[in-house]
Image: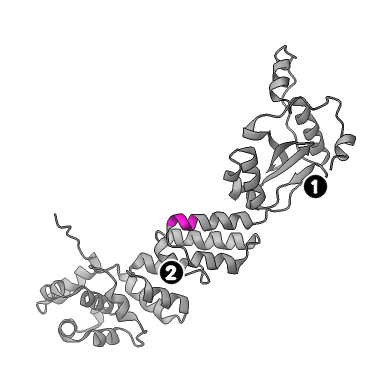
Amino acid sequence: MTLITSHPHWVLRHAIELDRYTQFCGEFFRASSERQHVIAAYLSAKSLSECDARDVADFLLQAGHDDILAAAHASLPSGLRRALRRAGAIVHEEHFYGLLVELLSCGESHITRCIAQVPRVDLDTLLAIQALPPEACSPKLVQAVTGSTDAEDVRTAFEVLVDRGVDAEWFAGCLREVKTQRALSSVFQKAARRAKAPPHPVPSSAFYHPIETGEELFSIAREFRNCLRNYTTSFLDEAQGNAFAVVSRAEHRTVVHLVRGTAGWKLEGLFKPRNRRPSRTTREWIEAYLEENGVIVERRQPRTPSRWDSLHNLICSDLLEFNIDFGFEEVDEIS
């Protein structure tokens, strides 16, 4: 079954108005799609209330494409007709034609190049070209993004990652070669790994190692086989207030997750590989170190010791190699 599509209301209203003076509608609907776009470009730029509608109707039915466009715009930008040829089978929203002329007239080479090379020109394409970072904008990237909202996300994400230390020239070069949504996501993952985190609230030491880059976050996520990489955005965004570190004790390592609240930084959690809980001894000395450095540790109320504590110690201990009397003096000596 053939899909029947209609032109937007604004151009139908103009066509019906001009049809009062001559048989305009029939000629307009039988015209090629390029001529329909040319006529629409004129009607979007000229108000019929300020013209002799009969003369306008005769002119639009008889004049050539270039003459119609020249009559609509005092300064005709290069490439306008070529763009209208690729504008599709139906007339676009009225805003499309003015924006197309504006972008072709702006003098920005990346904009005119993209308009000239994309296979289809519509309003979403123009808005995407307008939204993308100028240094990264390319015909390939324009086709890879799914509309203007996606393009705005690309621009914003590009800016925040460059602010976090990602090399703008490398980043833009990668984006210009993107052809698919999957490739687009891959480029941003690679860029996020090159980004630097905000300053960590606890100083580094021989055993306390703040995670400072996206690459380190991804590496620790692989090592600990957990979802740490899902925190990439909140880790890099200083406003969200998430910080991570790795505490090393001999060959055993624990991930520290800190969050910033209204009262300051506090401990959110301690994790072993696969998100296992560390032993009580490990937790207690890490908490003590964090408190010494101004981190809030919210402890649960002490509970009555249980015979089951023995099982917990065996299951959650670091391979039974931690000494209960392990003190900070010994920790400071670990290299």
Segment tinted magenta in the rendering: 181-185
* CA separation in Å, label 2 and label 1: 45 Å
Where in the figure is residue 306, as x and y percent of width and height?
72, 13
Q: Does 149 sit above or below residue 302? A: below
Q: Which corner quadrant of the image does residue 10 belong to?
A: bottom left
Q: Residue at x 63, y 33 (%)?
A: 275
In the picture, residue 31 is in which quadrant? bottom left
**Displayed quadrant of residue 58:** bottom left
Name the residue carrying label 2: 129
Q: Alpha-carbon neighbours of circle 2 within 10 Å: few (<14), some, or many (≥20)?
A: many
Q: Looking at this view, is 18 or 68 the one in front?
A: 68
Q: Amino acid at mark 1?
A: Ser
The mark total stands at 2
Above or below, 153 relative to 325: below
At x 36% / y 75%, what residue is drawn?
A: 100
Q: Which residue is mark 1?
A: 204
Apparent side of residue 84 relative to residue 137 in the rendered image (left or right): left
Question: Tag 2: residue type?
Answer: Ile
User: Residue 83 location in percent, x, y?
Assistant: 32, 76
> In this orientation, does residue 285 appear?
yes
Residue with the most extreme right position? 329
